[in-house]
Amino acid sequence: MSSTEDDQLAEFKDWWQRNGKPLVTGGLLALVVVFGWQAFQKYQGNQSQGASMLYQQLLETTLTPTGKPDPAQVADLAGKLKNEFGGSTYAQYGSLFVAKVAVDTGKLDDAASELKAIADKPSNPTLGEIARQRLAQVLAAQNKADEALKLLDGDADKAFVATREELKGDLLVQLGRTDEANAAYQKAKAALSDEAAVGGLQIKLDDLAKGDA
């Protein structure tokens, strides 16, 4: 090999060290990222499908001759959702279901525990608001209206303003704070259409006006 060829080979080796390897490494990394993401998406899809199937089974527990879910079956399915898909939206909807069954069977402490876990770390804002409002109702049933009111501090998403303000009104009535209750009911009414505002909410406002609340 001539000195010129030696020089060219040396230059190529130098170029390869500086550019070739990084290019190959970068290309391999890109492939790893692409295929890794595809595998992750497939995994997520399988996870979602598994959670969905368990949640569907949970809903089907209501299909009993009495029309009421079996508490033991509900607890079992919700437990599987928590263990296998903890923190997911499906698992938290399962917890809402468990809380409802607990309320129906008079186990308010159990219901409060389920709802508080969601409210503390909701998988999305909607679930968080639903859990807070239901927890407030449970606390009210436990004569803890002051504690329930604290859960409803701050602004709510527009879609939940009416239900939150009406619930605040109910709690304020329970505490004997009728003027504040009337203001909360008025806010709830303002957040609704005229048609929707006619009904239970208007009855509550009328009762306060009569002093019968």
Image (cartoon, helix red, strand yellow):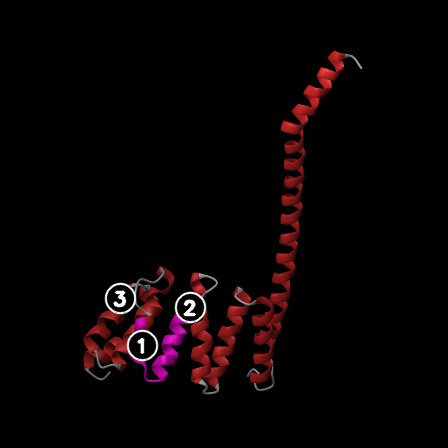
In terms of depth relative to the viewer, which is nearer, 25 or 136? 25
Where residue 160 appears, as percent x and y from the top left, is 37, 65
Disc 2 from disc 3: Cα separation:
26 Å
**Residue in the image at 32% along x and 69% along y:** 152
Q: Give the prevailing secondary structure in the magenta stretch.
A: helix
User: Which numbered dot is residue 187?
Assistant: 3
- Mark 2 or mark 3, whichever is nearer to me: 2
Q: Quadrant of residue 203?
A: bottom left
**Residue in the image at 43% along x and 83% along y:** 109
Q: Earlier in the sequence, mark 3 or mark 1?
A: 1
Bin the neighbour count of mark 2 within 10 Å (Cα to Cα): few under 14, some 14-19, many 20 and up. few
Tell whether 213 sits left or right of 76.
left
Secondary element at tag 3 = helix
What amino acid is labelled 1 in the image?
Answer: Glu
Q: Which residues fall within the magenta stretch?
A: 129-150
What amino acid is labelled 3 in the image?
Answer: Lys
Where residue 61 appears, as percent x and y from the top left, is 59, 79
**Residue in the image at 40% along x and 75% along y:** 135
Secondary element at tag 2 = helix
What amino acid is labelled 2 in the image?
Answer: Asp
User: Which numbered dot is residue 147?
Assistant: 1
Where residue 153 appears, as percent x and y from the top left, is 30, 67
Bin the neighbour count of mark 1 within 10 Å (Cα to Cα): few under 14, some 14-19, many 20 and up. few
Q: Earlier in the sequence, mark 2 or mark 3?
A: 2
Tell whether 117 sits left or right of 22.
left
Which residue was labeled with disc 2?
A: 120
Asked if residue 136 is among those painted magenta in the image, a careful observer would answer yes
- For the question of whether residue 169 can be seen, the reply is yes
What count of labels does the image hold?
A: 3
98 over 24 or under it: above or below: below
- Mark 3 or mark 1, whichever is nearer to me: 1
Disc 2 from disc 1: Cα separation:
15 Å
